[in-house]
Amino acid sequence: MPLGVVLRRTPGVTRWAKWAWKATAVLPGAEKADWRELRREGDVVEYHAATLPLELHGAETEAYVHGLGADVPCVYIVMRPIAGDATRPFKVELVTASPYEAQDYCDSAEEVVEKVAMTPGLRAWVEDFVEEFHHEEEFVKRRRDRLRTDAKQDGIGDPRIAKPADVYASPTLKKKRLA
């Protein structure tokens, strides 16, 4: 499903940041856009920055279930900062409904990940997908191998090393004695 990403530019609150940017909404089914201005109220401007496909995968339904179970189900917008461009400071890279995938992008610290609430229609679409493709996997506890407690231990270290020597030394090959 194509999702339009809305970014809001507000005046910065410090002298080091002239503008503050935040992803504020998504537009399901939006047409392609390239930083089209949607609304302006004084210094606050909202842009339809990009339209990207939201792809759902059957193997990731557990992540979607986790995301839908939140108080406010969200989609995640992954953006890469562009240095030196004040009018278009981000390239929108990805839109995902998987909180696990979003977490992976947060770990790199190279991208900015914003969380935006799902619209009711988008939420219903993701729920329908999960209902059709999610199969709860039964938890199977792994059985431990039986530990042999009757085995005799001869001491510390490698048996090929003579005990008066350093037990942490590397082993040497025993030389055959000629009689």
Image (cartoon, helix red, strand yellow):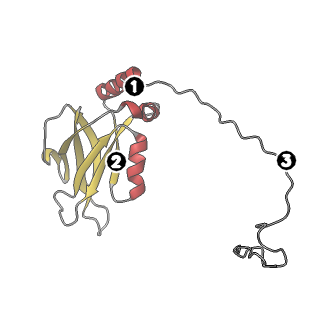
Label whose residue precedes the other's in the sequence (2 or 3):
2
Residue 114: which disc? 2
Where does the image place residue 79, in percent across and percent down from the top left? 28, 52
Name which residue type carries label 3: Thr
- Residue at mark 3: 149
Q: Residue at x 59, y 30 (%)?
A: 139
Decide which of 63, 173 is in the foreground and name it.
173
Front disc: 1 or 3: 3
Q: Are marks 2 and 1 in contact (CB under 8 Å)?
A: no
Q: Identify the element where label 2 is drawn.
A: strand
Q: Quadrant of the C terminus?
A: bottom right
- Residue at mark 1: 130
Q: Are marks 1 and 3 in contact (CB under 8 Å)?
A: no
Q: CA distance from mark 2 to mark 1?
A: 23 Å
Name which residue type carries label 1: Val
Q: Is residue 168 left or right of residue 179?
A: left
Q: CA distance from mark 2 to mark 3?
A: 54 Å
Q: Are marks 2 and 3 in contact (CB under 8 Å)?
A: no
Q: Quadrant of the N terminus?
A: top left
Q: Residues within 10 Å of mark 1 (few under 14, many from 20)?
A: many
Decide which of 46, 94 is in the foreground and name it.
94
Where does the image place residue 126, in percent across and percent down from the top left? 35, 27
Q: Identify the element where label 3 is drawn.
A: loop
Name which residue type carries label 2: Glu
Where does the image place residue 115, in percent across and percent down from the top left? 36, 44
Q: Is residue 136 left or right of residue 109?
A: right
Q: Is residue 13 above or below residue 25?
A: below
Label whose residue precedes the other's in the sequence (1 or 3):
1
Q: Identify the element where label 1 is drawn.
A: helix
Q: Residue at x 13, y 47 (%)?
A: 34
Decide which of 147, 26 is in the foreground and name it.
147
